[in-house]
Image (spheres, grey):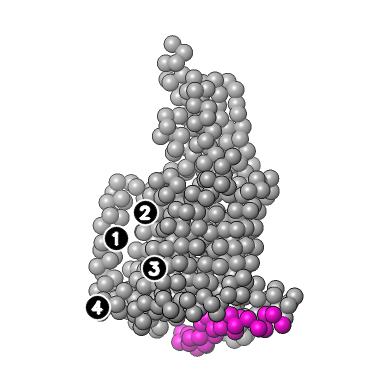
Amino acid sequence: MSGTGECITAGTSLLLGLAAGFIMHRSDFCMAGMLRDLFLFRSTFKLRILLLTVLAIMVLIEAARQAGLIYLFPFPGFGSSSLANLVGGMFFGVGMVLAGGCVAGTLYKMGSGKIVSAVAFAGLIVGSTLYAEFHSVWKSFADTVRILPGKVTLAQFVGLQQGTVISVIATLLAIPLFRWWRAGKLVRSSAADGYLQPWRAGLMLALLVTVSVLIIGIPLGITTSYAKAGAWIVSLFAPGHAEGLSYFKARAFDYPNHLLGITYSGGPGPACDTISLIQFPLIGGLIAGGFLSVRLLGEFKIHARVPRSQYLSAFIGGILMGLASRMAPSCNIWHILGGLPVLAIQSILFIVGLMPGAWLGGRLLTGIVLKD
Amino acid sequence: MQVKEIDMRGQICPSSLLMALREINANKLALRSGVIRLSFLSDNRDSTATIPESAANMGYEVSVIKEADSYRIDVFAKPDEMEKRTA
């Protein structure tokens, strides 16, 4: 695990995470907020930015694919869809709103000194680990409600070329975005120091996702490693129990990286495999990126005097996100910034589920957590 | 003018905006007549955009000042609004 390919993988992931964490902090690129604000405040500004980001990734990845720069397509990790994707998305939506940020938002906010996000992070690990306890039941449910076997993308489902379907959808997205751009609806004024306009941040993140696909072969994803971290903890205190859990023996990825001449193989089990090389540096980078940004601005300060209901909300939200990211499987970053731009059916179902989940999360947040 | 300070530092997102809207609504009359100024202390950078945006839409004047590690967002009546009410 110490060859050049492995070093490039870990280094690339670290730099991508660092850049993403910095960019997200400077622009308040909170993906949980993008959906939550739609229901809570009827605000669509952040959602417009998300659409721009998805469109940019869509165009960049399709261009790279047409240029023959992408060896494995559909990306490893995406498979046939199931209604479990939808149910997972729904739980994830509730969790990310209660936690005050998604899996990536939790990391950069934690790096910037938010204690509630650190609590959500702990919840994420607990939830991802809890999933291992009922993985076999959930897997059999997911297999039972599997739909469109063998069809990974929308293009495969409708029987058209990927390029044709992407061109149509990209054009449909570009029309309203162009109108919003001309009307100045993609720009917002902020008095925050070093503020990065979210539309710029979206384009930068699109580049980072494309770099990840070109070098590592898959879009950004981190949640398998939350389960892996939990597996390590369980195996430390109850090695026999960890050994008996089938989920910890599962393989999340097993694919060759032709560019670097190595094979990525591994899963959520408590082993130091190539998944650790991809995801742990990315997680560390996201935290460090948020920390670096806030330190350079001189805004780092830990404020722990927060109502207990908010700590509880963050923890429960983290658990729900952790559970849901295994049930779906995977998280919003993977599906929205990775699967949706290539029109993966799994990701479309996840996002369909995410909407009512975010709505319900908003209701719980305002009705219970922030009531007083 | 009385200043009511609300410390929202460290809180979960979007608590800052929700709390601010709640305080603005609860102190509507005093705010409009210029008796009170609401001063929100937040470390949530997003609040420097969302609170001023919402308060301005409700017809208030807003100022944002960076103070060490956080932002002070003041919401108060527009001068012409105060003149109208005191006339």
Assign a secondary structure to mark 1.
helix
Q: Which residue is mark 4?
A: A160
Which is in the foreground here, disc 1 or disc 3? 3
Residue A250 inside the magenta-drawn segment? yes
Asked if the residue at tag 4 contacts the one at tag 2, i.e. Cβ–Cβ closer than 8 Å, the answer is no
**Foreground tag (2 vs 3):** 3
Q: CA distance from mark 1 to mark 3?
A: 19 Å
Checking the image for residue A349, the label placed there is 3
Mark 3 Cα within 10 Å, few/some/many (few <14, many 20+)? Answer: many
Tags 1 and 3 on a common chain: yes
In whole angstroms, how far apart are the C-alphas of marks 4 and 3? 20 Å
Which quadrant is home to the C terminus of chain A?
top right
Disc 1 to disc 4, C-alpha distance: 19 Å
Residue matched to label 1: A173
- Disc 2 and disc 3: Cα gap in Å? 20 Å
Q: Is residue A140 visible?
A: yes
Q: Which residues are magenta?
A: A240-265
| B49 left or right of A182 in image | right
Q: Chain of mark 4?
A: A
User: In the image, what residue type sits under mark 4?
Assistant: Leu
Kindly give the residue lying farthest to the top in the view shown: B87
Q: Which of the two labelled residues, at mark 2 and mark 1, occupies the earlier sequence position?
A: 2
Q: Is residue A270 above or below residue B70?
A: below
Sequence-first disc among 1 and 4: 4
The label on residue B44 is: none
Viewer-nearest of labels 2 and 4? 4
Look at the image and say whether residue A100 sits in the magenta stretch: no
Residue labelled with disc 2: A48
**Neighbour tally class for label 4: few under 14, some 14-19, many 20 plus, Cα within 10 Å:** few
Q: Is residue B84 above or below residue A246?
A: above
